[in-house]
């Protein structure tokens, strides 16, 4: 009896460790303010054709925040708009497409597509998405390679030279 209890405890410990070890790799998107993020999340049509799907944000150290959820009926293609978020659900293609428009730096963070069935835990459909939004630079940035074509060399050689890092250094 004591041996069976210990074995059961070990099995529970092993299963919980295996679950904790399953970490989905993030897919990173680097975009600029004003752009649109589009993510396609495939799902198992046999299991989830009739299930609600959702787009969630995963704030650090907090519960997931559900941003938009598909509506019924699930058997036909549908589209749901909620502010800057759009979900396009196409059961015949087994695909959920997410769009976030007019991105801002504050939209940067971790997101995911899920099968949504509260109060149960959601089922993650796709890699978590790491969105990194940066501001548009008001001034264009010119980057020089360490080599310069022949036509530009004469101009640079008179008073400027290119450093190895691609910066202009004044020779005078």
Image (tube, grey):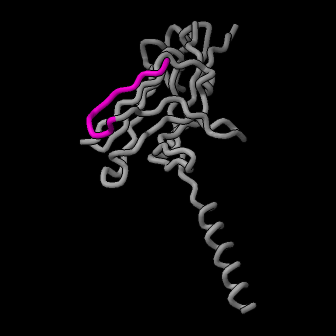
Name the one closer to the observer, 99 or 78: 78
Q: Residue 169 placed where, x, y %?
A: 66, 14
Give the quadrant of residue 72: top left
User: Within the magenta stretch, is there residue 15?
Assistant: no
Answer above or below: position of 162 versus 138: below
Q: Residue 1 placed where, x, y %?
A: 72, 92
Q: Residue at x 50, y 42 (%)?
A: 27
Answer above or below: position of 75 versus 137: below
Q: Residue at x 39, y 25 (%)?
A: 80
Taking 92 as reference, is 63 left or right? right
Figure label count: 0
User: Within the magenta stretch, is there residue 80?
Assistant: yes
Answer above or below: position of 80 versus 49: above
Name the one closer to the observer, 159 or 71: 71
Point out the stretch of residues depicted in magenta: 73-84
Give the quadrant of residue 149: top left
Q: Please state, as top left, top right, bottom left or bottom right, where the C terminus lies in the image.
A: top right
Q: Residue 86 placed where, x, y %?
A: 42, 25
Name the one closer to the observer, 75 or 58: 75
Answer above or below: position of 69 versus 19: above
Q: Residue at x 34, y 45 (%)?
A: 50
Q: Residue at x 52, y 19 (%)?
A: 103
């Amino acid at each position: 009896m004591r041996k069976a209890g210990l074995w059961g405890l070990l099995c529970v410990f092993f299963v919980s460790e295996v679950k904790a070890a399953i970490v989905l790799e993030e897919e990173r998107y680097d975009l600029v303010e004003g752009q649109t993020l589009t993510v396609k999340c495939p799902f198992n049509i046999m299991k989830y054709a009739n299930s609600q799907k959702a787009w969630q944000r995963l704030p650090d150290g907090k519960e997931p925040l559900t941003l938009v959820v598909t509506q019924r009926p699930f058997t036909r293609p549908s589209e749901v708009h909620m502010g800057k978020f759009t979900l396009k659900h196409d059961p015949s293609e087994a695909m959920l497409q997410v769009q976030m428009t007019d991105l801002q730096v504050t939209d940067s963070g971790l997101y995911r597509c899920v099968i949504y069935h509260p109060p149960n835990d959601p089922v993650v459909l796709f890699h978590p998405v790491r969105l990194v939004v940066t501001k548009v630079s008001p001034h264009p940035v010119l980057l020089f390679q360490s080599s310069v074509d022949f036509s530009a060399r004469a101009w640079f050689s008179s008073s400027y030279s290119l450093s190895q890092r691609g910066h202009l250094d004044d020779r005078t």
